[in-house]
Image: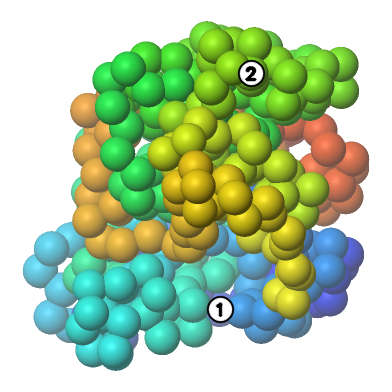
Amino acid sequence: MLASLLLEPGRLELRDVEIPKAGPGEVVVRVRTALTCGTDLKAFRRGHPKMTIPGPFGHEFSGDVHEVGEGVTKFQPGDQIMTAPSAPCGDCIYCRKAQENLCAKVMDTMVWGAFAEYVCMPSHIVANNMFKKPEHLSYEEAAMLEPLSCVVYGMDQVEVKPDDTVLIIGAGAIGLLHVMVARALGAERVIVAGRRESRLKLAWALGADEVIDVEEQNTFDRVKELTNDLGADIVIECTGQLAVWEETPDLARPGGSVILFGGLPSGTKATFDTSRLHYDQITLKGVFHYTRSAVKKAYQLLTDKKITVSGLISGTYSLNDLRHVFEDLLHQGKGIKFAVVPGKSEPSSAEAG
Ligand SMILES: [Zn+2]
Ligand SMILES: [Zn+2]
């Protein structure tokens, strides 16, 4: 089978390798669609502490069951499936304290290698975070389960009330997924602050009530204007930029909450005005990864068509085009997410900016 390997940052290679065999409890999936993700781009640019490099690449995908290992009863060959690429161990201190998103083994046992024709899913993921994909959901949409699970987990950490104004900073895939989830949770008003006209237009189309072009407008002034000088009830940081992290407490109303979604390199220090945290009692909360219950909620949002994520796909390519996708498109900030379909021969004409 063809599998894409990241040999070192900036160097992808397509290789012919053996199709994996399903061991006990495992399932080998024939990949039908894999999606690019910000994490992949980060790894492509500068490596990733949790990825083996050189090693297989890609982690958001859906497909068909090719082979099931001994003891697997949930699935059979031919089933269409969608899956998260990780699951908690169930046994470590974090799993036992109901903080399974922090599971000590979750990142070490995560599956990489979705940019390939086949991928083998370990038993703990098969048992916990793999589901049958209904026919009415496309493979592209189903492949969105992982990023959506992260977003659902983050939003679960705050209570969205019906009269809330939610401010989302960042109009990439994660920011835009937050727009859809905030809408689905019933937020009264969703404001998106971001850059690039095409992305802000998409934010409108996906349900934002107001957009702030941060290159043209001052975010702080505009948020104050839109909220009667109060600030937003909930602020969600989706850029992973220090300056934005530091700005977030000033964009929340007294008593409001800030979700810090976008990670920064370890060792990064941020500075806040303490009075906003103390006298104005603003909650700052970092969020990471997802729990099984977040995966289930994300699965439900997708399969019940409560949200439609296909608008985030900027184009469809084959495995042969993967280098082009990373080197020429994503690296230059083009598009939101790209779909990679093994076996697809011609690139699609859609290349959103
Ligand atoms: Zn991802
Ligand atoms: Zn664990």
Q: At label 1, which amino acid type do we have?
A: Glu
Does any portion of residue 188 appear in the rendered image?
yes
- 308 up-or-down from 172: above or below: above
User: How far from the left and from the top, in percent, is residue 181?
Assistant: 39, 31
Q: Residues within 10 Å of mark 2 (few under 14, many from 20)?
A: some
Does any portion of residue 140 appear in the rendered image?
no
Q: Residue at x 87, y 23 (%)?
A: 215
Which image quarter: residue 117? bottom right
Q: Residue at x 54, y 39 (%)?
A: 236
- 60 up-or-down from 216: above or below: below
Residue with the mark numbered 2: 224
Which image quarter: residue 56? bottom right
Residue with the mark numbered 1: 18
- 170 up-or-down from 39: above or below: above
Q: At label 2, which amino acid type do we have?
A: Lys
User: How far from the left and from the top, in percent, is residue 275?
Assistant: 59, 50
- 233 up-or-down from 56: above or below: above
Q: Measure the C-alpha gap from mark 1 to mark 2.
A: 58 Å
Q: Residues within 10 Å of mark 1 (few under 14, many from 20)?
A: few
Which image quarter: residue 42? bottom right
Image side of residue 160 versus residue 91, left or right: right
Image side of residue 180 versus residue 185, left or right: right
Does the numbered disc 2 mark a residue whose Cβ is under 8 Å from ligand 1?
no
Q: Residue at x 68, y 51 (%)?
A: 273
Does the numbered disc 1 mark a residue whose Cβ is under 8 Å from ligand 1?
no
Q: Quadrant of the N terminus?
A: bottom right
